[in-house]
Image: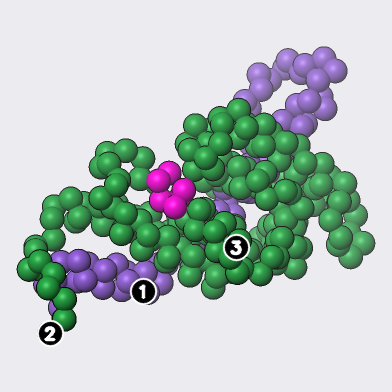
Chain colours: A purple, B green
Amino acid sequence: MTDNSNPPGKPPKGGASLEEARLRQQAIGVKLRHMFDEVVNEPVPDEFLDILRRADERSSGGSGA
Amino acid sequence: MSGTSSPPPKPPSADDEAFKRELVVLIPHLRAFARTLTGDPTAADDLAQDAMMKAWDARASYQMGTNMKAWTFMILRNQFYSEKRRSWRQTQLDQEAAERTLVAVDDPESPVALDELRLALATLPEEQREALILVGAGGFAYEEAAEICQCAVGTVKSRVSRARKALQATLEKGGYARDGRAAGDAMRSILAAADRLSSVRQG
């Protein structure tokens, strides 16, 4: 279950806190991405596509209406 | 009668169509970035829509095949700062705003961790927060983030690095105001949540 980016059985001597810091940074990174991705994964409000559609009609002479 | 003697309607060009398809794909990312900048979902969507329109209007200056994501993020960011200079309320993302940032979470399993992370992010200087979000959450390379922020690559690197250190220190010390929660809690809940998330991802 461990995230073994560190070779097992070879704990860096005196590097426990370094290793711990690395793990913490990794955890923060995972959470950051998660936070961002949650918005990315929200459904896009219709407004966005409506605006693009209108922009399209404006520039192409309303062919799609 | 549209009044203007504009050229006759031309059919949408293939380039326009391709541009639009790419732009549509980017909308969710623009929304997410906007939300981290404004800290408010409604303002964020306004900003993202403005940026989307600006990108569309400027499509002639975009070279197909280059990095459209970075290009649109740069437009959005410029839009944000110019509006902010003009009129936007000067809320330096304070902690209250931060709680609204990236709202509507939620992994019901880890609301605490997300809250704490949001609060801690809000304590970072704006340029550090933005650099960290782009690189650490948006998946941009340092070079791309530098392009978006219009600064040197080395500047982005040092901002990200300072942001990471500060964020960790804040989470460990509880450097944000929070009703008496023990300092280590935030970090512990983030570690636990991250563990869950990554095991879900690997599974």
* Frontmost residue, A61 versus B115: A61
The x and y percentages for residue B91 are 70, 65
Q: Secondary structure at mark 1?
A: helix
What chain does badge 3 belong to? Answer: B
Q: Would you say B74 lies left or right of B14 here?
A: right
Which stretch is magenta?
A: B70-75
Residue B109, percent from left and from top: 66, 60
Label 3 secondary element: helix
Chain on which label 2 sits: B
B74 within the magenta span? yes
Task: Choose mark 3 or mark 2, whichever is in front.
Answer: 2
Q: Amino acid at mark 2?
A: Met
- Dot 1: few (<14), some (14–19), or many (≥20) neighbours within 10 Å? few
**Residue with the mark numbered 1:** A46
Q: Amino acid at mark 3?
A: Lys
Residue B42: quarter of image: bottom right
Q: How many labels were placed on the picture?
A: 3
What type is the residue that disc 1 sits on?
Answer: Asp
From the image, state whether disc 3 or disc 1 is nearer to you.
3
SS at badge 2: loop
Badge 2 crowding class, 10 Å Cα cut-off, few under 14, some 14 to 19, many 20 or more, is few
Residue at 32 percent across and 38 percent down: it is B66
Residue at numbered disc 3? B84
Earlier along the polypeptide chain: callout 3 or callout 2? 2
Front residue (pair B54, A50): B54
Can you say whether B33 is above or below B157 in the image? below
Tell me which corner region of the image, top left, top right, bottom left or bottom right, holds residue A16: top right
Q: Tell me what residue is drawn at x 65 percent, y 37 percent.
A: B160
Q: Quarter of the image containing the C terminus of chain A?
A: bottom left
Give residue B1's mark. Answer: 2
Residue B1 appears in which quarter of the rendering?
A: bottom left
